[in-house]
Amino acid sequence: MMIISGGQNIFRLLKKIDYYRKAIKEIEQYSYEELTNMSDNKIKRFFEHLGLQNKKLKYIKSVFDFLKKHDINVIKKYPSEQLINLIKNKIQQAGYKVGQCATLYLKGYHSGVMPVDSGMNNLLRLQYF
């Protein structure tokens, strides 16, 4: 039964990845300006199959507010730890791990930032320890 349960969890996880891909592809069809002017309900529809639409909306709106107040070209030059903490402290629903990932994307993959989320941490622990 444990093996069956594990397999079912993987299938659910893979399905969720497909939903995230679909949401990202839909979002990429719009310009930043279009997204900032979009109704809350339309933004929430991107995530209808993923749940927690209100939290995702709060995060996205908070990112928009953050970008109004911070010049991306300036903050990209911040030391990584400073940028991670700025994102963590100024964007709602963003914690340290989100700050790491955002910093990684802003600075590029060779910035010395190595985010590891709890799911990856658990997976690595199961595989190697």
Image: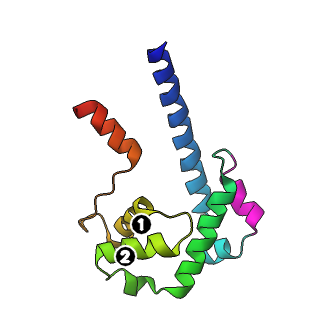
Q: Give the range drawn in magenta.
A: 39-48
Disc 2, SS: helix
The amino acid sitting under disc 1 is Gly
Query: Quarter-wise, where is residue 32 in the image?
Result: bottom right
Residue 62 place in picture, x, y as percent:
59, 73
Residue 64 place in picture, x, y as percent:
59, 76
Residue 83 place in picture, x, y as percent:
37, 76
- Which residue lies at the image location 65% right of the left edge and 51% below the top edge? 52
Q: CB atoms at circles 1 and 2 under 8 Å apart?
A: yes
Q: Name the residue under label 1.
A: 99
- Answer with left or right where residue 29 lies relative to residue 97: right
Query: Quarter-wise, where is residue 68 in the image?
Result: bottom right
Marking on residue 42: none
Regarding residue 86, the answer to whether it shows in the image is: yes
- State the residue in front, 63 or 32: 63
Number of numbered discs on residues: 2
Disc 1, SS: helix
Relative vertical location of residue 21 with respect to residue 89 in this rendering, above or below? above
